[in-house]
Each structure stands twice: as structure tokens, then as C-alpha cells.
Amino acid sequence: MIGEITVVPQAEGPARELVAKLLAEIADAGLHYEVGALGTSVEGDLERIFAAVRAIEERLRAEGVERAVIELRLQLEPHPETLAHQVEGIGLPEGGAP
């Protein structure tokens, strides 16, 4: 299954360090992932994706973040899906921009 996790913490200062810690939670859940500008695409079974979201919530609280939005989007398919297959054949020019 593939999905996308987006986290918008209400925290002071740059969030890059926090995002790196949240990505570690995704990796620890055993998910293949790709970081994007507005979210992180994930690939794995549903239970691992849910485990990653739970771990992200726990990490946010451990880091003192009292408010955050966590968005999870999932793509349900009748067959196994991968991140690579989703973008395969699009034919983007060098650099990714049309």
C-alpha cells in the first residue's frame, strides 16, 4: 500500500530537526519513504503505516509539541502498489519540472 503522511507542527523556530526525528520514526516502522516538499510518501503494509503515524504522534509529544496536524492519505488498490510504479512512465524532463 502507498500513502502520504504530512505533519504540520505548531512549534517555534525551524522544524527541520523535528522533521528529521519524525522521518526516523517512519524508517523505524520499516517503511520505504520519499520526502517531498509538502509531505512524505510511504510504501508498506497498512499496519506499519499506522504504527508510523502512532510513533510520530508520540515523538511530537515527547518533543514538547502540544499542537500539530497529522494528515494521512492512503491509496487502496486491488494489487500491491509501489511508489516507483506510481511515477513510472510520466516522462518528466531532467530536473522534474514540465
Image: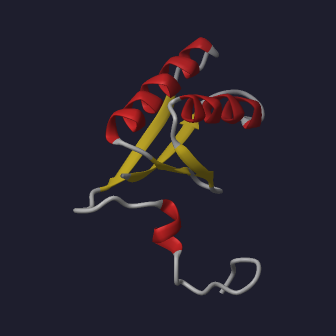
Quadrant occupied by the C terminus = bottom right
Q: In the figure, is residue 63 to the left or right of 86?
A: right
Please name the residue shown 52% across and 73% down the image. 87
Residue 65, horizontal then vertical, whole percent: 59, 20
**Above or below — where is 17 with respect to 37?**
above
Q: In the figure, is residue 78 to the left or right of 32?
A: left
Identify the image quadrant of residue 77.
bottom left
**Above or below — where is 58 with respect to 9?**
above
Q: Nearer the viewer, residue 52 or 17?
A: 52
Q: Looking at the image, how many numbered discs can be counted on the residues?
A: 0
Please name the residue shown 57% across and 20% down the image. 59
**Above or below — where is 63 with respect to 94?**
above
Q: Nearer the viewer, residue 33 or 65?
A: 33
- Residue at the extreme front: 80
- Residue at the extreme left: 78
Q: In the figure, is residue 75 to the left or right of 43?
A: left
Please name the residue shown 42% across and 45% down the image. 44
Residue 34, horizontal then vertical, whole percent: 61, 53
Residue 72, horizontal then vertical, whole percent: 40, 44
Identify the image quadrant of residue 91.
bottom right
Residue 48, horizontal then vertical, whole percent: 40, 34
Please name the residue shown 61% across and 31% down the image. 22
**Above or below — where is 89 with respect to 27?**
below
Report the colour scheme.
secondary structure
Q: Nearer the viewer, residue 17 or 3?
A: 3
